[in-house]
Image (tube, grey):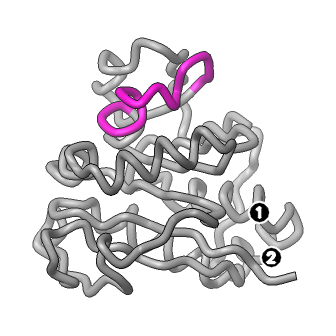
Amino acid sequence: MKQQRSYLFLAPGFEEIEALATVDVLRRAGMEVCTVAVNNGSISVKGAHGVSVEADILDSDADFSDAEWLICPGGMPGATNLAESPVVTNALKEQFSRGGKIAAICASPAIVLEPLGILAGKSATCYPGMEGYIKSADTVNTPVVAHDSLITGNGPASTIGFALAIVRNSMGEDVAKETGTAMLFYPDTSKFYF
């Protein structure tokens, strides 16, 4: 069976660790992940700390209809730029309506997902201090919150755990453990909220 493709959005001001480490971990695990430039037609996107990245495709060329995961890194103004992109918000709404998988970290759960109703009735985590933006979900002070089709993370230091939660969901515990162990990282999952 062919592995479904996942997409990670890169908008100007994205948090570099959250974006690049997530892509790296997913690819190490054997997942197909494509980076998408949300940048007014430019394939090169500059992150919150001045790191420029060349995305795999432009948002205008992307077809998200068969996406396994849509992934939103945080960062400011990256999260705001994602929330203001009709391509991103429409893709997320369509993914959510068909029961597809969505992951967001740092500011993005609060700034991108909450206004779309994606967090409603669930528990979620986000960057400390942004909990006030989340009205429809229970916020949890933990690195990662993983549901069957929704994973949220709280910030840069939690990125590898966030990415491994995605791997665990898609590829199983053994692949997640093998990937984390090869990176000298496989935390006690009791510290995460699964």
Q: Are marks 2 and 1 in contact (CB under 8 Å)?
A: no
115, above or below 61, in the image: above
Q: SS of the residue at dot 1?
A: helix
Residue 103, how many percent across, how many down? 54, 50
- Distance (Cα) linking label 2 and label 1: 14 Å
Q: SS of the residue at dot 2?
A: helix
- In screen coordinates, is 127 left or right of 22? left
Q: Quadrant of the C terminus?
A: top right
Viewer-proximal residue among 139 and 38: 38
* Sooner in the amino-acid sequence: mark 2 or mark 1: 1
Which residue is pictured at 76% across the width and 63% down the height? 170
Which residue is pictured at 70% across the width and 79% down the height? 29
Q: Which residues are magenta?
A: 110-123
Viewer-side label of 2, 1:
1
Residue 12: image tag: none
Query: Label 1, on which residue?
Result: 170
Task: Look at label 1 and name its amino acid.
Answer: Ser
Residue 53, how many percent across, how many down? 24, 82
Among the 4 quarters of the image, the one containing residue 190: top right
Residue 178: image tag: 2
- In screen coordinates, is 143 left or right of 68? left
Q: Quadrant of the N terminus?
A: bottom right
